[in-house]
């Protein structure tokens, strides 16, 4: 998976209908390089919750990348 840009992150988050604090935690990991554990602690979530959300975000991002690659 290519690195996700801030604009791509916002699109994926909107499509997943993600809300804070999950959205903020995942953003910390994907855009700022914070560890899953660190993002979970900062957001008041479990590491498992953040890990599950990351899996959903990454899967959606990969699907979008593949869909747009078909047009090339």
Image (cartoon, rainbow, N blue to C red):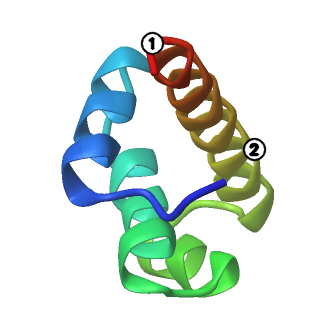
Q: Nearer the viewer, mark 2 or mark 1?
A: 1
* Residue 14 at x, y percent in the picture: 28, 24
64 displayed left or right of 20: right
Residue wearing tag 2: 52
- Say if 18 sits above or below 45 in the image: above
* Residue 37 at x, y percent in the picture: 68, 81
67 displayed left or right of 31: right
Picture quarter with the N terminus:
bottom right
| Residue at screen point 61% across, 25% down | 66
- Say if 5 sits above or below 14 in the image: below
| Residue at screen point 51% across, 76% down | 39
* Residue 22 at x, y percent in the picture: 45, 48
- Say if 55 sits above or below 42 in the image: above
43 displayed left or right of 36: left
Q: Residue 71, which numbered label? A: 1
| Residue at screen point 75% across, 44% down | 52
């Amino acid at each position: 998976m290519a690195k996700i840009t801030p604009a791509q992150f916002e699109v994926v988050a909107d499509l997943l209908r993600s809300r804070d604090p999950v959205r903020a935690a995942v953003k910390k990991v994907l855009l700022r390089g914070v560890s899953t554990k660190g993002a979970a602690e900062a957001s008041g979530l479990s590491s498992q919750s953040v890990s599950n959300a990351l899996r959903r975000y990454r899967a959606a991002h990969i699907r979008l990348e593949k869909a747009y690659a078909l047009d090339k």
